[in-house]
Image: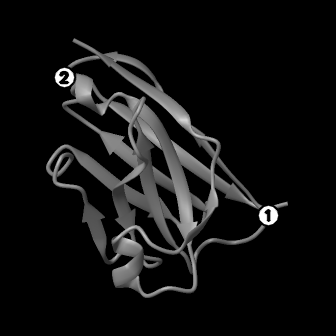
Amino acid sequence: QVQLVESGGGLVQAGGSLRLSCAASGRTFSSDAMGWFRQAPGKERVIVAAISWSGGRTYYADSVKGRFTISRDNAKNTVYLQMNSLKPEDTAVYYCAASRGVTTNQAMAGRGYDYWGQGTQVTVSS
């Protein structure tokens, strides 16, 4: 059974940091682009960051540039999202996802993600 399991969410004060992890199992995701998405209450799910299969290319939404860093360890089948200088508007459920069968450009644009985790809640208090 293919699974993506997120962890590391929680409650943090504004200005604080969290590190999300996404552990994949069931098959290797080392050939997949991986992405982090988030969905705030009443809003659509949007891409936050993405990373190519090799880690050589990354994408960040403007709202998180300079604060968030996506990385991956293919040997551990795990992708990470380091979140610094958190703001209340970062509050959302964060999902990791795997993209296969599309170009890197498309994956960086948030397309072609067909495996999803269950999500982890991040709450930033002011």
Residue pictured at 14% horizontal, 49% vertical: 66
Say if 60 sits above or below 9 in the image.
below
Question: In the rendered image, is residue 56 in sight?
Answer: yes
Residue pictured at 43% horizontal, 48% vertical: 45
Nearest to N terminus: mark 1 or mark 2: 2
Residue pictured at 50% horizontal, 56% vertical: 79
Which quadrant does the C terminus fall into?
top left
In-front residue for pair 13/106: 106
Query: Callout 2: few (<14), some (14-19), or many (20+) C-alpha neighbours within 10 Å?
Result: some
Q: Would you say 6 lies left or right of 81 here?
A: right
Question: In the rendered image, is residue 8 in sight?
Answer: no
Instruction: In the rendered structure, find residue 26 and report the number of the disc placed on it.
Output: 1
Residue type marked 1: Gly
Residue pictured at 55% horizontal, 59% vertical: 97
Which quadrant does the N terminus fall into?
bottom right
x, y (%) of residue 55? 39, 73
Q: Secondary structure under badge 1? A: loop
Residue type marked 2: Gly
Inter-mark Cα distance, 1 to 2: 36 Å
Mark 2 lies on residue: 15
Say if 50 sits above or below 120 in the image.
below
x, y (%) of residue 91? 35, 27
Q: Would you say 113 lies left or right of 24 here?
A: left
Query: Callout 1: few (<14), some (14-19), or many (20+) C-alpha neighbours within 10 Å?
Result: few
